[in-house]
């Protein structure tokens, strides 16, 4: 004997009748007429070859078979609900792994703030944050090591797509006790007599700084060369000298006893997020973009 192929509508009506104990109440809950509910139950019984409900003392009473069927129906519905939750979790990125990269300028302060907010929203998600040199960004994305990279360096590469997540300026970092620390802004000319901790001209920071110095008609004289922004910040904290960095790197510098004084007539410094154009952006990447833009606004 062939097994009956149950229909979703039959199960839905059966559950409603079992839950309400009444054809009338079930029809109201489902938003259909009572005759429609009665007909659906009758066809369901015919296909199953058994009686599901009996009239006893004017009340609709489920049979033992109906009770046992309901147990199985609820078990399957429970599994379906868990499946729906699992699919929704995957779409939302909860419980998944999100691996991305950043260069130190963005990664020092702005990324930790964004990561904290994203962790609060998705506590089950596992995050991997790789700190990269600028020269490694293309291969990191092209070979799928991470989903995206944040940096202040502009990359003209046909394999990469980009969006700007923040815009900043240059600031001069110095100890809070420095003679220039209380000024509202500072010009390159005013730093002429200071020990300058800075970056080579070919680096992203070096290019932004030289462009700003050019506006002021000055050239940099570097006393201490550094390659990474965290080194510049550490050297300033040791009172070796002052350093010009992007404002993203200088966020919360007061915790180290430093002051970030805006540099006059600074060029704009965009913060970029890159991803490989041959791969779709994940939900987590979209959330990182939105979070960074929100923090920078």
Image (cartoon, helix red, strand yellow):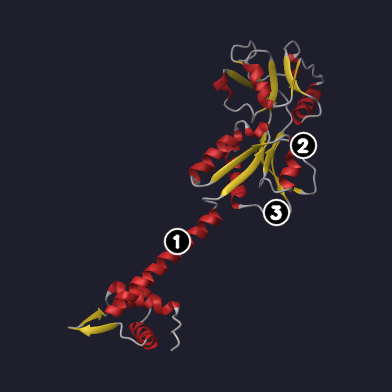
- Label 3, secondary structure: give it: loop
Q: Quadrant of the C terminus?
A: top right
Q: Which residue is label 2 attached to?
A: 135
Mark closest to the chain's N terminus, 2 or 3: 2
Which disc number belongs to residue 82?
Answer: 1
Where residue 32 sits: x, y (%)?
38, 79
Q: Is residue 31 visible?
A: no
Q: Is residue 46 visible?
A: yes
Which disc number belongs to residue 279?
Answer: 3
Out of 99 and 258, give the one closest to the viewer: 99
Mark closest to the chain's N terminus, 1 or 3: 1
Out of 150 and 221, give the one closest to the viewer: 150
7 relative to 284 in the view: left or right:
left
Q: Please tell me which residue is depicted at 31% across the width and 75% down the height of the picture.
A: 68
Q: CA distance from mark 2 to mark 1?
A: 44 Å
Quarter of image, res 40: bottom left
Q: Residues within 10 Å of mark 1 (few under 14, many from 20)?
A: few
Mark closest to the chain's N terminus, 2 or 1: 1
- Label 1, secondary structure: give it: helix
């Amino acid at each position: 004997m062939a097994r009956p192929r149950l229909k979703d509508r039959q199960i839905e009506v059966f559950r409603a009748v079992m839950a309400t104990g009444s054809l009338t109440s079930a029809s109201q809950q489902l938003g259909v007429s009572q005759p429609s509910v009665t007909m659906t139950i009758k066809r369901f019984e015919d296909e199953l070859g058994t009686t599901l409900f009996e009239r006893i003392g004017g009340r609709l009473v489920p049979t033992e078979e109906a009770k046992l069927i309901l147990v199985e129906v609820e078990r399957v519905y429970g599994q379906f609900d868990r499946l729906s939750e699992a699919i929704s979790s995957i779409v939302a990125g909860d419980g998944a792994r999100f691996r991305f990269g950043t260069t130190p300028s963005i990664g020092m302060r702005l990324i930790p703030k964004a990561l904290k907010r994203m962790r609060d929203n998705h506590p089950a998600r596992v995050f991997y944050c790789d700190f990269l040199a600028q020269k490694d960004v293309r291969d990191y994305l092209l070979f799928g090591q991470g989903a995206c990279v944040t940096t202040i360096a502009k990359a003209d590469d046909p394999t990469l797509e980009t969006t700007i997540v923040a815009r900043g300026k240059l600031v001069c970092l110095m100890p809070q006790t420095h003679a220039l620390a209380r000024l509202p802004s500072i010009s390159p000319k005013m730093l002429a007599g200071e020990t300058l901790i800075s970056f080579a001209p070919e680096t992203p920071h070096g290019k932004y700084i030289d462009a700003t110095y050019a506006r002021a008609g000055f050239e940099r004289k570097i006393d201490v060369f550094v390659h990474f922004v965290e080194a510049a910040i550490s050297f300033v904290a040791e009172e070796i000298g002052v350093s010009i960095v992007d404002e993203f790197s200088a966020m919360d510098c007061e915790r180290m006893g430093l002051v970030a004084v805006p540099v006059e007539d600074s060029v704009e410094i965009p913060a970029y997020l890159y991803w490989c154009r041959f791969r779709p952006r994940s939900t987590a990447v979209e959330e990182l973009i939105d979070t960074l833009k929100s923090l920078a606004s």
